[in-house]
Image (cartoon, rainbow, N blue to C red):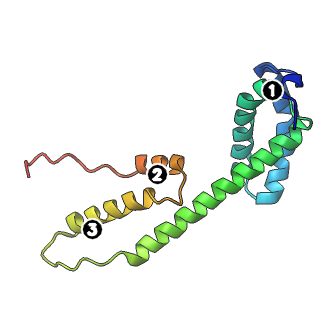
Amino acid sequence: MRDVAASPKLDEGEVGRIFPEESGRSVAALIRVFGDIDVAEDAVQEAFAVALSKWPGDGLPPNPGGWITTTARNRAIDRLRRESRGRELLSDVSVLSPGNDDPGMSEEVGLVEDDRLRLIFTCCHPALSTEAQVALTLRLPRRPVDQGGR
């Protein structure tokens, strides 16, 4: 086990100096792995955010570039899994979505209400992280306030 008291303390400025040295290599490695520039850049940014919170207290890891790349790769994998699962859930919802059985009901009122409810349940699925659930729920279309007193 590593002796935390023996590790040198680090300030945010030192982490900021490491960023330009290591970010390019990490982004390039992740682009090669994932084939997506946006995923790679976002993951490296998240890894440096984690480093800013951990390294000042824990000290500099033995291989900062490797730490950043590994953390970023794990973040990217988590993100891609969440997105994939979200697409699966939306696909399942669209397959299970019944047609409008009541010809007297307005299509807008009947389907919109059901679709919103399905979206809410989809956004709250336990397979999604809490952060993803909140983000998806906040992106849901808002129902206009009923002015007619119904």
Q: Residue furthest right?
A: 62
| Residue 19, horizontal then vertical, whole percent | 81, 31
Type of amino acid under label 1: Val
Q: Residue at x 29, y 78 (%)?
A: 99
Residue where numbered disc 3 is placed: 111
Type of amino acid under label 2: Leu
Residue where numbered disc 1 is placed: 15
Gap in Å between the C-alphas at discs 2 and 1?
32 Å
Q: Is residue 126 above or below residue 98?
A: above
Check the picture and name the quadrant holding the N terminus: top right
* 150 horizontally vs 28: left or right: left
| Residue 150, horizontal then vertical, whole percent | 8, 52
Residue 71: name its quadrant: top right
Q: Is residue 16 above or below residue 73?
A: above
Residue where numbered disc 2 is placed: 136
Type of amino acid under label 3: Leu
